[in-house]
Amino acid sequence: MDRPITEQAVFTPWQHTVLCKAMWRIVPFLFGCYVIAYLDRVNVGFAALSMNKDVGLSPSQYGFGVGLFFFGYFALEIPSNLMLQRIGARVWIARIMITWGLISAATALVTGPTGFYAMRFLLGLAEAGFVPGVFLYLASWFPGVWRSRTTAAFLVGIPVAGLFGSPISGFLLTLDGWIGLRGWQWLLVLEGLPAVFLGIACLFVLSDRPSEAEWLAPEEREWLSGRLAEERDDIATHSPGGVLSALANPCVLICAATNFAMIMGSSGVAYWTPLIIRNFGLTYVQVGMVTAIPPLVAMVGMVLWSRSADRTGKRIAHVAATGILGFCGLAVSAFAETPALAIAGLTATVLASTSFQASFWAIPPGFLTGRAAAGGIALIVSVGNLGGFTGPYLVGYLKQATDSYQVALLLLSFCILCSAGLVTLAGRMIAARRAAYVPS
């Protein structure tokens, strides 16, 4: 599993050009979609700076409502991914984006805790399948040796959403009272509608598979389709079976637990960072500017991290290292008494969580293919999303119980550390299973 593979040993210059052509057509567009998706998912953290008082949300109610998004995501994750495989990524990703954009904007209409709970759950239902669907889509376009870089190029949307979204969100809160709407309502509406327009654009930009891409020359379509078919056949030889076998695969289950541990920690931080920073007495605009620092560092760091993982082939080691880094960063944040130290710790945590995503999601397609990949990847994301509920809710509950973020942050730091041990175990099991099929 962890073995260095040089691109020059695999692809000729012409083949490299074909892959670059496909990458520049597909990945920037999906990246833009994810920027908007992630912004719509976490902008409620900024809205909470004034929304919680208007709507009447306590810290525990806010944490619970934020987490309900992930229950909705969990409920439809596997069915959504299987539907994407059945009808094609172009139509299904368009459907996801249009519905989540409308629901995200409609969240501006909530007037109490129940309405907030309902809209967060519906947003999760609408967005279910987007991220694992994109991972599956990228696996149908790019060979394994390119997988970390394409995954990282897509997932860099997370820090970019924070880098640009944080200052914008802080500014939109200052529109309070314009045309009778509160600032947090303007934030949710103006950041939700772009998803609708990008969803419509999906129908014209994406092609379901290389064989259908009219923007590739015939010989390019033929080579890329054949190369990917060979890789799928090789993976199927080492990991036979369909959806049910993937869901019972111990490697899949441990990967799911790894994702749960990391997302529990990272989501617990993501939805509370503006409120944590606000505790130091900063204005809305200042909170937006300061909160943009971690994603700025993460945007550069995750790309370098994924390139290192591709170059060395040691993806398991790279993923494990992010768990250790995240643990250290969050532990520092827990004891920080100044904004500078708090933001330094949070920056390390955000760098760890984004770099984790870039390297981790290149692992499952290396031992799953076909319907097994659709079901297995969806399960890994689904279980991880339960961590997305647990983390924010735990922070809210402990904040309300202790009147401090310290205990919650320390607990989340240990969860992130667990991801390092789990992914190491997963790597050993994957290598052992491959060895059982391939004589040494």
Image (cartoon, rainbow, N blue to C red):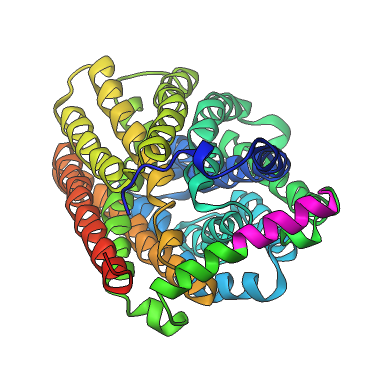
Looking at the image, the residue that sits furthest to the front is 440
Q: Residue at x 68, y 63 (%)?
A: 89
Q: Is residue 128 visible?
A: no
Give the left or right position of residue 252, taking residue 402 as reference: right
- Main secondary structure along the magenta-highlighted residues: helix
* Residue 414 percent location from the top left of the image: 15, 46
Q: Where 172 sits versus 2, above or below?
A: above
In the rendered image, the quadrant that contains the C terminus is: bottom left
Give the left or right position of residue 44, taking residue 36 as reference: left
Q: Where 347 sits versus 128, above or below?
A: above
* Residue 240 percent location from the top left of the image: 42, 79
In the foreground, 179 or 41: 41
In the foreground, 234 or 101: 234
Asked if residue 152 lies in the magenta stretch, the reply is no
* Residue 368 percent location from the top left of the image: 44, 68
Asked if residue 219 lies in the magenta stretch, the reply is yes
Q: Where 336 sits versus 408, above or below?
A: above
- Region rendered in magenta: 216-228
Give the left or right position of residue 419, taking residue 373 as reference: left
